[in-house]
Image (cartoon, grey):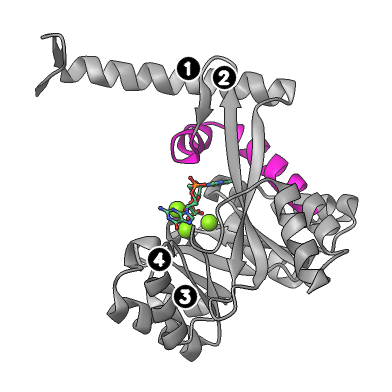
Amino acid sequence: RAKRRGGGTVETYDESLREAVLRHLELERALRTGLDAGEGLGVAYQPIVDPATGACRGVEALARWASPGLGPVGPDEFIPVAERSALILRLGEEVLARSYAAANRWRQLVPDFTVAVNVSPRQLQQPDFATRLADLARRSGAPVAAVHLEVTEGLVLQEDEAVEDNLNRLRALGVRLSLDDFGTGWSSLARLRTLALDRLKVDRSFIGDEVVLRACVELGRALGIDVVAEGVEEPAQAQVLQRLGYPLAQGYLFGRPVPEEEVTLLLLARQRV
Ligand code: C2E
Ligand code: MG
Ligand code: MG
Ligand code: MG
C-alpha cells in the first residue's frame, strides 16, 4: 500500500514501517538516557471521586515523560516502548516509589487516602516484585496498602507462576488490585472471581452506554467489589452514574491529571470546609 503525502511524494508501506522502527529506537534511546540521568520522567495524579458529591477518594498515578530532544511524549506511545525492553522495570519502580512518597504526604491530610498505580505484566513477572514493593513502602513511611495496583486483562489471562505468586504475596501484604480498562479484553467471569479483585475500572469507551454501565455496576455488586467508571467528561454522564449507583468515577469532568502539589491543595481546601 502506498499513501500520498503533501508535496506530491509517495510514501510506501516500507518507508512508514521504517519510520516507525526509527521512532521506536529513538524513543528507547531517549528513555534510557533520561532514566540513567534521572531526568524527564514525571508523575501526574488524577482524582478518583464519588460521583454523587465529587469528593476525592484517591488518585491514579499516570507517568509523564519529556526529553530535551523529543519534547513531551504521551504514555500511550512511551509505555509500549518501555514494555518492549527492560526499561519498564526501572520506569515502573520509579513511579511506584514516587507514588508511595506522595501517598505518605497526603495521608497526613486524609488518613485513608490511596494512590492507584498501573503495573505492566513484565513487572509482575519479576520474582521479587512483591518484596521490592514492600521495600519501597517501608522507605516511604506509608503503609503498603496506601497503593493499589491496576492490572490489565492481558495479565489476568496469563497463567504465569511468577505472576500468580506475586499476586498472592501482594494480597497477603494488603495491596488491593484493580482490573483496568474492563470490558475491552477477554477475561472470563470465572477468572475475575478466582483473582479476588477489589475493583473494576470500566473502560472509558463505555461511558455513553448505559446498558453496559448498568451491567458492570451490577456485576460489581454481585462480586462485592468497587466499580469505577472511567472517562467522565460531561455532567449528563455523571448523572447517569449517580442514578446507577456508581460508587466511584474518574474523568476530566471531575479533574484532569495534575502535579502532586495540586492534589495537596485540593485536599487542604477540603479540610477547611
Ligand atoms: P489508564 O490506566 O486507563 O489511564 C487512564 C487514561 O485515561 C489516562 O491517559 C488519563 O489521562 C485518561 N483520561 C482520564 N480521564 C479522561 C477523560 O475524561 N477523557 C479522556 N479522553 N481521557 C481521560 P494517559 O495518562 O495518557 O495514560 C494512558 C495509559 O498509559 C494508561 O491508561 C495506562 O495504561 C498507561 N500508563 C500510564 N502511566 C503508566 C505507568 O506508570 N505504568 C504503566 N505500566 N502504564 C502506564
Ligand atoms: Mg489505569
Ligand atoms: Mg483505564
Ligand atoms: Mg488504558
Asked if the residue at tag 4 contacts the one at tag 2, i.e. Cβ–Cβ closer than 8 Å, the answer is no
* Residue type at numbered disc 2: Ala
Q: Which residue is mark 3?
A: 192
Relative horizontal placement of residue 130, taking residue 105 as reference (left or right): left
Q: Does 11 sit above or below residue 189?
A: above
The residues bearing labels 3 and 1 have C-alpha atoms spaced at a distance of 38 Å
Q: Nearer the viewer, residue 55 or 139?
A: 55
Q: Which residue is mark 2?
A: 30
Outermost residue to the front: 273
Q: Earlier in the sequence, mark 3 or mark 2?
A: 2
Earlier sequence position, callout 2 versus callout 4: 2
Which residue occupies 49% across, 61% down? 251
Instruction: Please tell me whether mark 2 or mark 4 is closer to you in this view.
Output: 4
**Residue 55 location, x and y as percent?**
65, 73
Q: Which residue is mark 1?
A: 26
Compared across the picture, whether 155 is left or right of 109 comes to left
Q: Residue at x 55, y 53 (%)?
A: 256
Q: Which mark is residue 11?
A: none
Secondary structure category for the residue under label 2:
helix
Quick one: label 3 or label 4, which is nearer the N terminus? 3
Magenta range is 74-100
Above-or-below relation of 178 to 92? below
Q: Which class describes the residues within 10 Å of circle 1: few (<14), some (14-19), or many (20+)?
A: some
> Residue 234 shows which numbered tag?
4
Place of residue 236 in the rendered image (x, y in percent of width and height, measured from the top left): 37, 73
Q: CA distance from mark 1 to mark 4?
A: 38 Å
Query: Between tags 3 and 4, which lies in front?
Result: 4
- As for residue 80 lying within the magenta part, the answer is yes
Secondary structure, mark 3, is helix
- Disc 3 packing (10 Å; few <14; some 14–19; many ≥20): some
